[in-house]
Amino acid sequence: YPVGAGMGTEEFREYLKGALFLDREDPVGAWRALSRFQEALIGRLSQGRELRIQAPGTDLRLSVAGRRWINSDGRRNMPSGEVFTGPLEDSAEGEVRFNLPAFVGGRRVEGVYLRFKGGEVVEARAEVGEEYLLAALATDEGARRLGEVGIGTNFGLTRPTGLILLDEKMGGTVHLALGRSYPETGGKNPSALHWDLVLSLREGSLLLDGEPLVERGRFVGVSEPHPF
C-alpha cells in the first residue's frame, strides 16, 4: 500500500483536481454547496449528546455534549471537507479498529486497534507499525486521550492514499485524533501529539443519540442534501 495508492504523477494530479472540485463546471459553487451541507450537518450534530461508531471490530461511544463543531469548508486547508469537534475527555468507551492505513513519520501504520475506558486508551496494538503506535501513546499523559472527532464529507476523494490530510476528508469516513484538542471546539486535552486515525464507514455506521447519521458511507437524515 504505497503512499498515493500507487498513482503516478499525472494520475495523482487528476485525483487532486477531483478532490479540489476543479473538475466541476463551477468549483467555487461546489465548495459553497458543500459548506451549506456541512452547516446543516453541524446543526444536527449540535443538538446531540452522544456519538456511537459501529463497524467490524468497532463499537465506540463518545460524548460531544456542549462542544462546538467546526465547519472546515476550504478556509483551513485544501483539500477540505470535514466537520469536527473535541469529545469530552473522559467519555470514550469501547473499542475501535481503524481500517485505513497511514504513513506517519516515514512509517506505515496499519490495522490500529484501541480500547478505551473512561476516555483513556487501555489497550493498543497494530498489525503494522505497532512500535510507532506505542511510542506515540507514550508521548505524554494527554496522548492516551482523544482530542478530536471528525467526519469526512468530500466524495471527490474517491480512494484512500495513506496521506492523512487527504484521507480524513473522504466522504463517509470518521477520524479520531489522539492527543491535543483544538481549543475553539471547547476541547481541553493538552498534548504534544495530534495524530488522526481514519475509519471508513462503508461497512459501518455513525449514530447520534441512537439515530443514524452515516450508514454504509452515506449521510442520512440531514436537512440539506449532499451536493454530490
Image (tube, grey):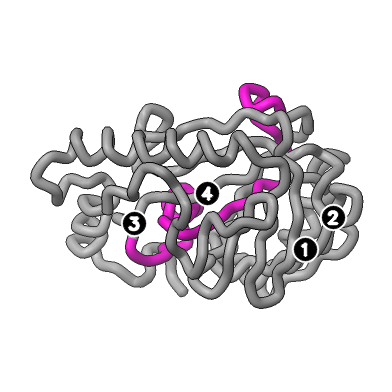
Q: Amino acid at mark 4?
A: Ile
Q: List the residue tagged with mark 3.
A: 155
Q: Is residue 78 left or right of residue 139?
A: left
Q: List the residue tagged with mark 4.
A: 151
Q: Secondary structure at mark 2?
A: strand
Q: Which mark is residue 121?
A: 2
Instruction: Give the answer, above or below, for where 209 lies relative to 100.
Output: above
Instruction: Count every numbered label the image shows and give the total.
Output: 4
Q: Which residues are magenta?
A: 158-186
Residue found at the far top of this picture:
184
Is 141 included in the stretch rendered in magenta?
A: no
Nearest to the eye among marks 3 and 2: give it. 3
Nearest to the observer: residue 41 or residue 104? 41
Nearest to the observer: residue 191 or residue 129? 191
Q: Is residue 174 left or right of residue 40?
A: right
Instruction: Give the answer, above or below, for where 103 lies relative to 22.
Output: below
Q: Which mark is residue 114?
A: 1
Q: Are marks 1 and 2 in contact (CB under 8 Å)?
A: yes
* Residue drawn 12% across the image and 40% down it: 26
Q: Amino acid at mark 1?
A: Leu
Q: Amino acid at mark 3?
A: Phe
Nearest to the observer: residue 63 or residue 78? 63
Q: Along the polypeptide, which appears first: circle 2 or circle 4?
A: 2
Q: Secondary structure at mark 3?
A: loop
In whole angstroms, how far apart are the C-alphas of marks 3 and 1? 27 Å
In whole angstroms, how far apart are the C-alphas of marks 2 and 4? 21 Å
Q: Along the polypeptide, which appears first: circle 3 or circle 2?
A: 2
